[in-house]
Image (cartoon, rainbow, N blue to C red):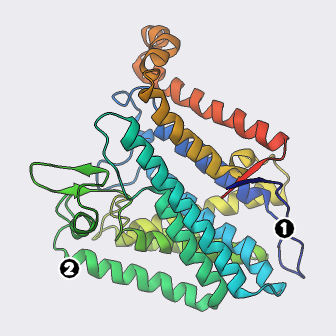
């Protein structure tokens, strides 16, 4: 882990090899949304767009993680493909990617271990958001380095088809009883997000089997990043609309479900992510609009990991409840209601980390794992 000066890659021919402000902006907006939905003042008073679907379905909050994995795939295309074209050895690129993936995974485990040690009643959790990001990054980087582009689409189709077979073989998509939860229980035991001691059933939204279709989400981003480099934004529009149509059609018999990361969910969220990337590219890169969110995007891991650590520290030190009560709920709730008070805390949390990211960017400090 290090603080580094971020340098854009040099241009190579007709391809776009520079760092695109639109990608940083989209990543940053995604991270800001992640902090907003993860940090309400009161979990009992959260507006529905800021909550995950109870099980089947897709709310705006359910778009956040697949968008992040998609943008990560775009970033792999913009960072690794130019270096391949410049003649950097494939093994050297893969080793660097694998070490980075291991550092991301280790950071996720360390945060979970800190929570288990510091928060009363919290047990160690082996899966997690950063762990899934690390695995997806390693796999997508390997595809970018060693395989042709047609293999990316073949891998996406294979992952979605194979995962569909796995889900159907499980017999049900019901919460707790599906094959994904059963596999996670066999692999991780009780060390997951949710565990029912009475029945032994477990559930983790970032578990092992559902990481397979999450890799497909990242591969869609890899394809999108290659189109951006080749100056083919029209393909983003076409592919985004096709993915949306297939996702909607597939959801009629296999519902959208973030917890299971169903194939319909991959295509639906991937299609929306492609259209969002196209919009950001047109507005920021081509029209010159301000790259809102760029500072978050340049320090995405720092903002996310730092916010997770603060989420642990505030309740562990006994500060969260009095801070929320005295600075927010105590005077906002009587005037505007508890939902507004809870949302205001979340907005303030995002603003705090935006200020930190702004200060780091001003000093050209970028946390690279």
Is residue 105 or residue 30 the one in the foreground? 105
Residue 63 in view here: no
Q: Earlier in the sequence, mark 2 or mark 1?
A: 1
Q: Determine the residue positioned at 59% across, 83% down.
A: 143
Outermost residue, front side: 117
Q: Secondary structure at mark 1?
A: loop
Q: Determine the residue positioned at 47% across, 63% down.
A: 132
Q: Is residue 368 above or below residue 134?
A: above
Q: CA distance from mark 2 to mark 1?
A: 45 Å
Question: Where's residue 277, x and y in %?
Answer: 66, 61
Mark linked to residue 360: none
- Asked where in the image residue 281 lies, by quadrant, the reply is bottom right
Question: Is residue 102 rendered to the left or right of residue 144?
Answer: left
Residue under numbered circle 2: 169
Question: Where's residue 163, x and y in %?
Answer: 34, 78
Residue under numbered circle 1: 18
Outermost residue, left side: 198
Callout 2–callout 1 Cβ contact below 8 Å: no
Q: Secondary structure at mark 2?
A: helix
């Amino acid at each position: 882990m290090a603080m580094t000066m971020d340098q854009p890659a040099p241009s190579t021919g007709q391809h776009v090899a520079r760092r695109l402000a639109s990608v940083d902006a989209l990543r940053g907006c995604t991270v800001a949304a992640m902090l907003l939905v993860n940090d309400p003042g009161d979990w009992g008073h959260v507006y529905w767009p800021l909550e995950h679907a109870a099980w089947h379905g897709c709310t705006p909050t359910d778009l956040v993680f697949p968008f992040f994995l998609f943008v990560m795939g775009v970033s792999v295309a913009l960072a690794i493909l130019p270096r391949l074209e410049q003649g950097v050895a494939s093994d050297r690129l893969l080793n660097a990617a694998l070490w980075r993936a291991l550092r991301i995974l280790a950071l996720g485990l360390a945060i979970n271990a800190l929570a288990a040690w510091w928060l009363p009643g919290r047990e160690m959790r082996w899966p997690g958001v950063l762990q899934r990001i690390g695995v997806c990054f390693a796999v997508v980087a390997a595809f970018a380095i060693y395989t042709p582009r047609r293999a990316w689409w073949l891998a996406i189709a294979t992952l979605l088809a194979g995962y569909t077979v796995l889900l159907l073989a499980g017999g049900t998509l019901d919460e707790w009883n599906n094959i994904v939860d059963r596999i996670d229980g066999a692999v991780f035991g009780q060390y997951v997000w949710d565990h029912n001691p009475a029945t032994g059933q477990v559930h983790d939204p970032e578990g092992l089997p559902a990481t397979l279709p999450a890799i497909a989400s990242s591969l869609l981003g890899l394809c999108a990043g290659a189109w951006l480099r080749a100056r083919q934004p029209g393909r983003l529009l076409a592919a985004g609309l096709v993915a949306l149509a297939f996702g909607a059609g597939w959801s009629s018999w296999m519902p959208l479900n973030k917890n299971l990361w169903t194939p319909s969910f991959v295509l639906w969220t991937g299609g929306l992510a492609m259209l969002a990337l196209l919009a950001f590219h047109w507005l920021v890169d081509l029209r010159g609009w301000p790259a809102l969110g760029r500072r978050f995007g340049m320090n995405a891991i720092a903002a996310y990991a730092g916010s997770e650590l603060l989420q642990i520290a505030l309740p562990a030190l006994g500060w969260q409840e009095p801070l929320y009560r005295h600075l927010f709920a105590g005077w906002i709730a009587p005037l505007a209601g508890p939902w507004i008070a809870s949302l205001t805390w979340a907005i303030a949390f995002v603003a705090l980390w935006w200020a930190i990211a702004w200060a780091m960017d001003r000093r050209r400090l970028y946390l690279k794992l």
